[in-house]
Amino acid sequence: MKVLVYSAKPFEKPLLEKANAAIHKISYTEKRLTSETAMKALNYDAISIFSADDASDIVLTKLRDFGVRYITLRSAGHDNINLKTARHLGFKVANTPSYSPNAIAEHAIALLLAFNRKITLAQQQTLQDNFLLDNLIGFDLTGKTVGVMGTGRIGSVLVKILDGFGCNIVANDTSSNEELITNYDVSYISKDALANEAEIIFISLPLNQLTHYLFDKTYIAKLSKKPIIVNVARGGIVHTTEILKALNKGLVSGYATDVYEREHGVFFYDRSHNAPNDTELHQLLCHPKTLVTPHQAFATREALHNIASATLENLNAWAEGKHAVNELS
């Protein structure tokens, strides 16, 4: 098949080529998939897209008209594609659901530890020959009540790591994971109860109609313990305006995030010579109670290898007239 890879990163290409083993004719573009760049897919059988790409209704219609039949996502989340429209237009769509929950869960823990123990500030101080500890006081994780919102693949790994720190773990999800209850003494409670009990909250939920702006003004007001919030899911789950207000008012002790609700066209790009015109992003980056990384949680050697392998497995299955294991439509 002829395949076009959108949002292709230099570090991805060798892995995709190796996984392809010269079976398909693959082309690459660093451009995001948008209504304007959909034309690049003319006469391609399949495209591969990433979380920053736009596969909304108008884009899908254009892709169908250009001859594309298959879409494989190099991500677990698929909030950037309208699956109902994709099915209606006859697309086969698949994702890479379990490329490395370890990578993302470990990054979430890294965000918490770096924020709590003031690692960034410590480095800034020592580079200036300032070795005082006055501003570098953190707290022990042992014994803290930690809320995990979403106990799927990533959330489950988070629970296991947090258990090793000696945390008391409460969780919320649409269904309970019996393994986590039995082996890690996890208590499943309501969202409101979690807001009342948790001193630290990890977000590992998919972005959908139920979770969009879950952390809004109303829910943030229920956070009685002034928790640190760690987000390795999707930026749109947290209302940026409201989290900034909460940080300024002291309703939240900190916000460590790998995602941002308006990250498209910003994250994954060097904008040092063309700074984003986004006041709230600037406030988030500069706030003394935040830690922001550029959607890098997935970026480990193991995860990238697994993404490439799963992407080509999807394409190979379709080329052979079979259903892909990770097929969504």
Image: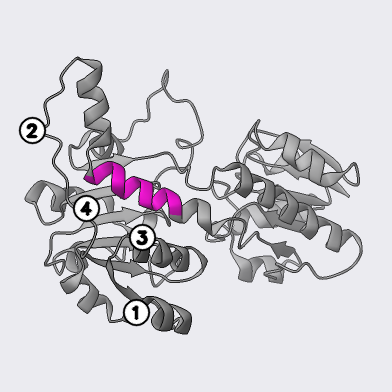
Disc with the residue nearer the chain's start (2 vs 1): 2
Q: Is residue 110 magenta?
A: yes
Q: Which residue is found at the position 23% from the left and 33% from the top?
A: 286
Q: Badge 4: few (under 14), some or many (20 or more) residues near its Cα, within 10 Å?
A: many
Residue designated by label 3: 237
Q: Residue at x 67, y 69 (%)?
A: 328
Disc 2 residue crowd, few under 14, some 14–19, many 20+, Cα 10 Å = few
The answer to whether marks 2 and 4 mark residues whose Cβ atoms lie closer than 8 Å is no
- Going by the numbered disc 3, the residue's amino acid type is Ile
Q: Are marks 2 and 3 in contact (CB under 8 Å)?
A: no
- Among the two numbered marks 3 and 1 on one chain, the one whose residue lies closer to the N terminus: 1
Q: Residue furthest top?
A: 129
Looking at the picture, how far across and down is residue 287, in whole percent? 20, 37
Image coordinates of residue 282 in percent, x first then y, are 27, 34
Earlier-in-chain disc, 2 versus 4 = 2
> Which disc, if any, is residue 243?
4
Q: Mark 2 to mark 3: distance in Å?
A: 34 Å
Q: Which residues are magenta?
A: 106-116
> Is tag 4's residue or tag 3's residue first in the polypeptide sequence?
3
- Compute the Cα span from label 2 to label 1: 36 Å
Disc 2 to disc 4, how far (Cα)? 27 Å
CB under 8 Å between discs 4 and 1: no
Q: Nearer the viewer, mark 4 or mark 1?
A: 1
Q: Earlier in the sequence, mark 2 or mark 3?
A: 2
| Mark 1: few/some/many CA within 10 Å (<14, 14-19, 20+) | some
Give residue 126's quadrant in the image.
top left
**Image: 320 above or below 305:** below
Residue identified by numbered label 2: 134
Residue 94 or residue 119, whichever sits in front: 119
Disc 1 on helix, strand or loop?
loop
Residue type at the position of mark 2? Asp
